[in-house]
Image (cartoon, coloured by chain):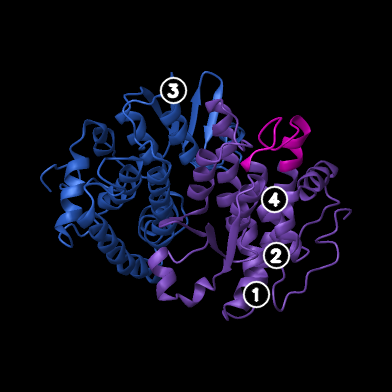
Chain colours: A blue, B purple
């Protein structure tokens, strides 16, 4: 049995949850208040971050290490193409969302509005929120440009890159920070991915103090 | 022919350079002043970051995407074990250095002391430098603890995780920010990796305005 220590709105945990659900890997989700630095948790991951996977004596931290592990051990359905250059494009885009998008958007909007309140770090810094709100437009436009040439973000098949992107956008959508009217390409892509059975776990999330907005779980948003 | 757009002290570029050199992949290094946001460079990588690999019409950005690409296309010598759990440990440690160590140490020391000057962003913030100097001790102790149980960071064979760690530490060593006397385990590990032929490319680096200290290229440091 797999156990995943996670936080509901963490985009890194959401990426792992989507990959596991798509591959039909059963998982017990354990919410971890990682900021309290529980010694048991720190023993599992001295970096003090979620997600952390535990299964039969094996412990894996770092979201991409977990995703690649499941791609190698549960190869069907494949969430990466077999061609090395195409795999590189998938991993480039995962890096794009988990690093660039994360630094410019997720950390500026989600972490300011939600994480600071949950962890007791105080109020959102309006300068950061403004920067994130500006920058997400550029990223949505970049996605629209990619989706103009491709059916999915990394090419003509759905991959882990789509899950990485949807993990960030779904967390931001929980706090109504995504303007779905900016690009019909991006909206159509999100509608396709949101309607997958694997997505249901994310749509059921509830975060105390942050009620789920009506459109969040609506497949016809 | 492969061309790598890079910056000499970037730990992400250094990791790629080590992987390519260890696999004896010839590469033309092109120094990229990425902060000037040259339009040609931004076309290659809209994220505006180094490293970027170009080879025969193929463009790959994101250091881990490039490293995994070479692991898949030039499998010998292997820089990852074949067992999925062992591969996960390699990738966890790469995440450890490229994310946690990077945020807590590299960005606080190297970027404050060197990058800010190169990019004209001003003077080092002494609060950050102090935080980085404190935090690197914890990381060296964590490495010492790992190397107490293992010959190399991720297990009994040398892997990409060792290169990720050495990439960060070598860049910090260029500005004399690593206390090699803190742990004999870590010093012995670095001596082993530093003496590999693949490391020579890093030891030859020169950064204008930051003269190479004598111990940096000395194998008997």
Q: Which mark is residue B171?
A: none
Q: Position of residue B64 (x, y in %)?
A: 51, 48
* Disc nearest the viewer among 2 and 4: 4
| Disc 2 and disc 3 in contact, CB within 8 angstroms | no
Q: Is residue B151 found inside the magenta-colored segment of the image? A: yes
Which secondary structure, mark 1? Answer: loop
Q: Which residue position is annotated with label 2?
A: B130
Q: Residue furthest right?
A: B220
Q: Earlier in the sequence, mark 1 or mark 4?
A: 1
Mark 2 to mark 1 CA distance (whole Å) = 10 Å
Q: Earlier in the sequence, mark 2 or mark 1?
A: 1
- Compared with B53, B96 (above or below) is above
| Disc 3 and disc 4 in contact, CB within 8 angstroms | no
Q: Which mark is residue A2?
A: 3
Q: Which residue position is annotated with label 4?
A: B166
Mark 2 to mark 4 CA distance (whole Å) = 22 Å
* Disc nearest the viewer among 2 and 1: 1
Q: Are marks 2 and 3 on the same chain?
A: no
Chain letter for the residue marked with disc 3 in the picture: A
Q: Position of residue A104 (x, y in %)?
A: 40, 63
Q: Earlier in the sequence, mark 2 or mark 4?
A: 2
Rendering quarter of residue B56? bottom left
Please give the range of residues in magenta.
B143-160
Chain letter for the residue marked with disc 4 in the picture: B
Taking the spot 85% from the left edge, 62% from the top edge, the residue there is B215
Taking the spot 59% from the left edge, 66% from the top edge, the residue there is B7
Q: Is residue B212 found inside the magenta-colored segment of the image? A: no
> How packed is label 1: few (under 14 Cα within 10 Å), some, or many (20 or more)?
some
Chain letter for the residue marked with disc 2 in the picture: B
Rendering quarter of residue A195? top left
Which secondary structure, mark 3? Answer: strand
Q: Which mark is residue B124?
A: 1
């Amino acid at each position: 049995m797999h156990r995943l220590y996670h936080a509901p709105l963490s985009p890194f945990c959401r990426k792992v949850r989507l990959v596991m659900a798509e591959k039909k890997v059963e998982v017990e989700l354990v919410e971890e208040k990682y900021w309290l630095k529980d010694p048991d948790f720190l023993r599992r991951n001295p970096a003090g971050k979620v997600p952390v996977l535990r299964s039969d004596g094996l412990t894996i931290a770092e979201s991409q290490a977990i995703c690649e592990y499941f791609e190698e051990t549960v190869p069907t359905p494949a969430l990466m193409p077999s061609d090395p250059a195409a795999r590189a494009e998938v991993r480039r885009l995962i890096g794009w969302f988990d690093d660039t998008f994360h630094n410019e958007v997720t950390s500026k909007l989600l972490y300011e509005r939600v994480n600071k309140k949950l962890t007791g770090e105080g109020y959102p810094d309006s300068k950061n929120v403004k920067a994130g709100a500006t920058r997400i437009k550029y990223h949505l436009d970049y996605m629209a440009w990619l989706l103009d040439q491709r059916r999915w973000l990394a090419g003509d098949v759905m991959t882990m890159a789509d899950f990485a992107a949807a993990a960030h956008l779904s967390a931001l959508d929980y706090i109504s920070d995504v303007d779905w009217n900016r690009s019909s390409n991006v909206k159509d892509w999100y509608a396709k991915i949101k309607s997958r059975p694997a997505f249901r776990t994310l749509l059921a999330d509830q975060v105390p103090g942050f009620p789920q907005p009506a459109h969040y779980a609506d497949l016809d948003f």
